[in-house]
Image (cartoon, rainbow, N blue to C red):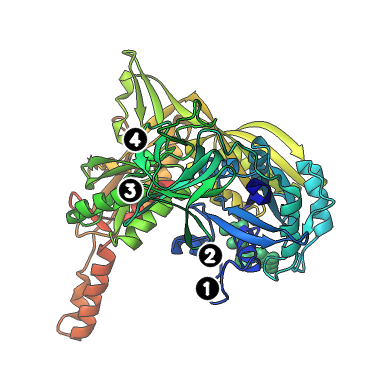
């Protein structure tokens, strides 16, 4: 029977614990890649991912493996993204598996996202195989980490594989445990088709390529398929699997993982979590758990050159084809002109999109500070959802404002508990709980406004704990807060793109810090420029950029012509990231400055 030789599994880990490296070793061991092709971190496709060492788009590979029992197995390794922003995608890909390798760094031990990923795996009833990685490191302490896996996670770690993905130690044992411990897929090959979409990517030639796991029935070329949530129908032109290169197959049946191509032009028709069925013999019920995911963080993206507006729209259209969680809408700013308000899953997602627009599409951008979505209850009974601070109504019209809150778990060595508590307090956190993991590590649980996490919480956490703190969060809902809009005026004019929303108790301090920061960031102009921070009509802070005294070129006058040209070029280079706001030249950093104060 075909299903008996199939094993579907993922690798879960805290970031940097070695998931990608292990995936490479597994590909190598199963002979999926020739030596020539063997390139570090094959599964992380985009250059950007490779540079940042993170996995964004999950992928699946089908690997033949001859086990010690003499049988040929098919292992489907499904890669998962390792960052909190992408929790939803992790959950989907885990749903396509029966087992997971839990990779834990032998010197770092269990971290916040190790736990978060374990919870996701347990929710999906996966068999978890602990792997203690990086045992080659001098600081490795596999016995301590094993104990941690038992005490903190509650898993039996007596069979945990001691491995080094880097040195290629323990790889075969890992594969043997996958074959032995991960259950073969169940599901009825004769029932009507039900396949779970766990990812999709856009290919300019083939259209959308859907990554899916067949749960029941069989999917084949020529079949008319229906997506049960979107109710879209398409004729299947190709079925196959990545091994790791695409291999066309006749069909995939219950338990198998692979891809489907059907000349689909928009990834939005193929939502992650939706169920594919046979339009001519449809299943009664979709697979459980389809949920729409909403962006949590918004910012404005503006081309530095206003003539690049259409190029920017095209870039966003193309990125959207690949990334159903990205949203955008045209937006106009008095200061920045025409641009787009874009919605993201989180900060990392936002940074990745910005970088891709600049690198892959070559469009220099001005980005405004990210904002969360506020709920504004007006005195006239209307409720507004505000994702751009500029759109906040006048104070007189507001009854109350609510903001999104998260529950954050922070794991940290004892020595840093005080420091972390102070940061959380500064970020308007409510203390919920503290748990000792063992004698020297603690999990702190706080309720925090999402907006404060967006404002460099993570950086502060890392830098004040020498990188030891790890952190994970989930959205818990909206709560009322005493929030006000702060405007920034340059030369007496409100710069809409610099407005932000702040808690009233911190308004004064933030206003002062920001005007000071802006004074340093905005270069001197030919005239004096006042910078003011105001709430409504009330100015709460003021700084002044004094006028430039001399023409910088004067020095070169009549002198060395090449030096003069160099100077001009340098200025031009700098100007790329400048935006003329009224008569003042403002650099990109100014629009993000609000993120880096406190
Ligand atoms: P991921 O974020 O979980 O995908 O982690 P990566 O696979 O990108 O690895 C993070 C870093 O740890 C990289 O610099 C790897 O070279 C390194 N690394 C991974 N596995 C090992 C190992 O077994 N031993 C050592 N010493 N380093 C490793
Ligand atoms: Mg990785």
Q: Nearer the viewer, residue 208 or 184?
A: 184
Quote the CA–CA distance across marks 4 and 1: 49 Å
Kindly identify which residue carries mark 4: 389
The residue indicated by pointer 3 is 263
Nearer the observer, 213 or 520:
213
State which image quarter holds ligand 1: bottom right
**Quadrant position of residue 266:** top left
| Pair 4/1: label in front | 1
The local secondary structure at tag 3 comes to: loop
Alpha-carbon distance for marks 4 and 2?
A: 41 Å
Residue with the most extreme bottom position: 560
| Picture layout, residue 131 above or below residue 513 | below
Distance between the alpha carbons at the discs numbered 2 and 1 = 9 Å
In the picture of the structure, the residue carrying the numbered disc 2 is 42
In the rendered view, would you say 593 is above or below 216? below
Please say if the residues under marks 3 and 2 sit with CB atoms less than 8 Å apart: no
Please report whichever mark, 2 or 1, sits nearer to the chain's N-terminal start.
Answer: 1
Looking at the image, is 38 positioned above or below residue 86? Answer: below
Residue farthest left in this picture = 558
Q: Which residue is mark 1?
A: 37
The image position of residue 78, as x and y in percent, is 57, 51
Q: Is residue 9 visible?
A: yes
User: How far apart are the alpha carbons under marks 3 and 4?
Assistant: 41 Å
Q: Look at the numbered discs 2 and 1 and tell me whether their residues touch, using CB distance below 8 Å.
A: yes
Give the label, 2 or 1, closer to the camera.
1
User: Does label 2 point to a residue whose CB lies under 8 Å from ligand 2?
Assistant: no
Name the element at disc 1.
Answer: loop
Q: Nearer the viewer, mark 3 or mark 4?
A: 3
Could you tell me how far apart the alpha carbons at marks 3 and 2 are, in whole angstroms?
A: 27 Å
Q: Secondary structure at mark 4?
A: helix
Nearer the viewer's eye, disc 3 or disc 2?
3
């Amino acid at each position: 029977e075909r299903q008996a030789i199939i094993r579907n599994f993922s690798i879960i880990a805290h970031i940097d614990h070695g998931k990608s490296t292990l995936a490479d070793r597994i590909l190598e061991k199963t002979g999926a890649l020739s030596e020539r092709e063997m390139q570090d971190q094959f599964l992380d496709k985009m250059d950007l991912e490779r540079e940042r060492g993170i996995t964004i788009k999950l992928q699946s590979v089908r690997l033949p493996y001859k086990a010690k029992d003499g049988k040929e197995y098919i292992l489907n390794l499904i890669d998962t993204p390792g960052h909190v922003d992408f929790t939803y995608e992790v959950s989907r890909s885990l749903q396509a598996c029966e087992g997971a390798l839990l990779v834990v760094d032998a010197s770092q031990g269990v971290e916040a996202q190790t736990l978060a990923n374990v919870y996701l795996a347990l929710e999906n009833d996966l068999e978890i195989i602990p792997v203690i990685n990086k045992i080659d490191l001098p600081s490795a302490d596999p016995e301590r980490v094993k104990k941690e896996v038992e005490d903190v996670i509650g898993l039996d770690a007596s069979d945990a594989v001691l491995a080094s993905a880097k040195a290629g130690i323990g790889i075969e044992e890992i594969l043997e445990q996958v074959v032995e411990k991960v259950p073969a897929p169940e599901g009825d090959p004769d029932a009507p088709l039900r396949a779970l979409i766990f990812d999709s990517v856009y290919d300019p030639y083939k259209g959308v390529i859907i990554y899916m796991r067949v749960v029941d029935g069989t999917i084949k070329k020529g079949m008319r398929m229906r997506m049960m949530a979107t109710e879209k129908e398409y004729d299947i032109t190709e079925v196959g699997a990545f091994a790791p290169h695409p291999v066309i197959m006749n069909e995939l049946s219950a338990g198998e993982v692979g891809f489907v191509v059907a000349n689909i032009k928009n990834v939005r028709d193929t939502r992650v979590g939706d169920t594919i069925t046979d339009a001519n013999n449809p299943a009664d019920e979709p697979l459980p758990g389809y949920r729409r995911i909403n962006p949590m963080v918004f910012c404005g993206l503006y081309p530095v050159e206003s003539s690049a507006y259409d190029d920017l729209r095209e870039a966003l259209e193309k990125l959207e084809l690949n990334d159903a969680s990205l949203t955008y809408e045209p937006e106009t700013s008095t200061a920045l002109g025409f641009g787009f308000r874009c919605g993201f899953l989180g900060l990392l997602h936002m940074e990745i999109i910005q970088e891709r627009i600049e690198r892959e599409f070559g469009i220099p951008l001005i980005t405004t500070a990210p904002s969360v979505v506020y709920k504004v209850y007006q005195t006239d009974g209307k409720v507004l959802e505000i994702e751009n601070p500029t759109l906040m109504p006048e104070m007189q019209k507001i009854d109350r404002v609510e903001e999104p809150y998260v529950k954050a778990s922070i794991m940290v060595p004892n020595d840093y508990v005080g420091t972390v508590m102070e940061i959380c307090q500064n970020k308007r956190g409510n203390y919920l709980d503290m748990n000792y993991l063992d004698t020297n590590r603690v999990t702190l649980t706080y309720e925090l406004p999402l907006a404060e996490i967006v404002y460099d919480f993570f950086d502060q956490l890392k830098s004040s704990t020498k990188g030891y703190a790890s952190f994970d969060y989930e959205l818990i809902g909206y709560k009322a807060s005493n929030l006000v809009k702060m405007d920034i005026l340059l030369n007496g004019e409100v710069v809409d793109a610099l407005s932000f929303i702040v808690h009233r108790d911190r308004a004064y301090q933030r206003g002062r810090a920001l005007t000071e920061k802006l004074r340093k960031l905005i270069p001197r102009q030919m005239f004096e420029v006042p910078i003011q921070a105001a709430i409504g009509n009330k100015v709460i802070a003021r700084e002044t950029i004094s006028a430039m005294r001399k023409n910088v070129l004067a020095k070169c006058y009549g002198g060395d012509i090449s030096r003069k040209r160099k100077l001009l070029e340098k200025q031009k280079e700098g100007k790329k990231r400048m935006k003329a706001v009224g008569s003042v030249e403002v650099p990109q950093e100014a629009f993000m400055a609000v993120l880096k104060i406190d």
